[in-house]
Amino acid sequence: MGITEVTGVIAVVVSVLYLGLQIRDNTKVLRSQAHYNALSLAQRPMEMMIENESLANVVNRSYADADAVSADEWARFGNYAFIGFNAWEYLYYQHRDKAIPKELWVGADRGGSFSRVERYGRAGPRCQGLSALPLLGRQ
């Protein structure tokens, strides 16, 4: 084997090692971005309640007695809950793919607004459609 062939083999090995490092670094960046996205989505319903007193009123009254709110208020609450379900779903899939820390998933799945919507979804006939989503794929 000549010097040219040895140099070529060394260059290929160095390139493969460098590629491995790049992939590892890219994976870290993607996990970090997934974590940030999960936090942003999970916090959005809370931010909406803080920023909008009228929405907070509708959401709290809807949780207390779904039949006591108007159709427009119920639609508003439904959209709020849908945002929460979408965030829960994103966290679920990111957890399943091991893209976010387990603690973030456990916190989102067991507490906060997600579990409140789930508990409420089982409470009354107006909410029966809300009860199924948080149970899908629970692990």
Image: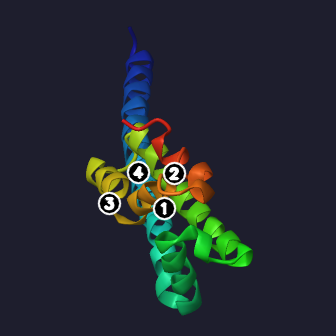
Q: Position of residue 102 (x, y in %)?
A: 29, 47
Going by the picture, which residue comes out furthest to the right?
72
- Residue at 54%, 46% (x, y): give it: 133
Helix, strand or loop for disc 3: loop
Disc 1 vs disc 2: which is toward the camera? Answer: 2
The reply to whether discs 1 and 2 touch (Cβ–Cβ < 8 Å) is yes
Query: Residue 31, labelled with which disc?
Result: 4
Q: Position of residue 10 (x, y in %)?
A: 37, 25
**Front position in the image: 15 or 121:** 121
Q: Where is residue 96 in the image (x, y as percent from the top left)?
A: 41, 38
First in residue order: circle 1 vs circle 3? 1
Q: Mark 2 points at which residue?
A: 90
The answer to whether one can see residue 84 in this image is: yes
Query: Residue 111, labelled with which disc?
Result: 3
Q: Distance between the residues labelled 1 and 2?
A: 9 Å
The reply to whether discs 4 and 1 touch (Cβ–Cβ < 8 Å) is no
- Residue at 32%, 60% (x, y): give it: 111
- Residue at 49%, 70% (x, y): give it: 63
First in residue order: circle 2 vs circle 4? 4
Taking the image as shown, residue 109 lies to the left or right of residue 127, namely left
Q: Position of residue 119 (x, y in %)?
A: 42, 56
Please, what is the three-letter code of the amino acid marked with disc 4?
Answer: Arg
**Counting other residues with Cα less than 10 Å from the Cα at mark 3, is it few (<14), some (14-19), or many (20 or more)?**
few
